[in-house]
Amino acid sequence: MASLGRVAQGYFLAAIVGISVGILVGTSPIVNKALDPLFQFLRMVAPLAWVPIALVALQQNQPAAIFVIFITSVWSILKLVTLAVENRLC
């Protein structure tokens, strides 16, 4: 049950951030052009590469696990919301 809770927390945070930023990026071409290279770069980092970074930065297993779940799922949510707001995805 504890792992299911971590997955729910990480995905919930990713959904909040992904939807919010996706709407902002999808409605503003200037913000889209400014942030898209950063998003594309961070999206290509392998999920396993975030594990040691999270453990060193957060120093505890629970927040590190939630962060890894968040960071690996936020990019797909953000991209899909951006495309939907731009009316490219129907």
Image (spheres, rainbow, N blue to C red):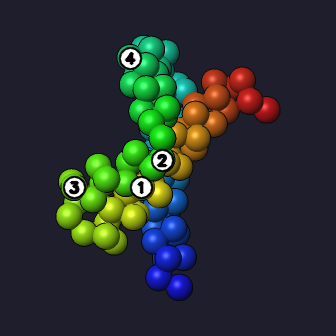
Q: Mark 1 points at which residue?
A: 68
Q: Which mark is residue 34?
A: 4
The one of 28 and 62 positioned closer to us in this rendering = 62
Judged from the image, the secondary structure of the residue bearing numbered disc 4 is helix
Q: Which amino acid does label 3 sit on?
A: Val
Of callouts 3 and 2, the N-terminal one: 2
Q: Which residue does the image show at 47% across and 57% down from the upper left? A: 69
Q: How far apart, in angstroms, are the residues tagged by discs 4 and 3?
A: 29 Å
Residue 77 in picture, x, y percent from top left: 57, 43
* Residue labelled with disc 3: 56
First along the sequence among labels 2 and 4: 4
Q: Which of marks 2 and 4 is in front?
A: 2
Q: Position of residue 33 (x, y in %)?
A: 45, 14
**Contact check, label 1 and label 2, Cβ < 8 Å:** yes
Q: Nearer the viewer, residue 56 or 18?
A: 56
Disc 2 target residue = 47
* Real-space CA distance between mark 3 and mark 1, rounded to the nearest whole angstrom: 12 Å
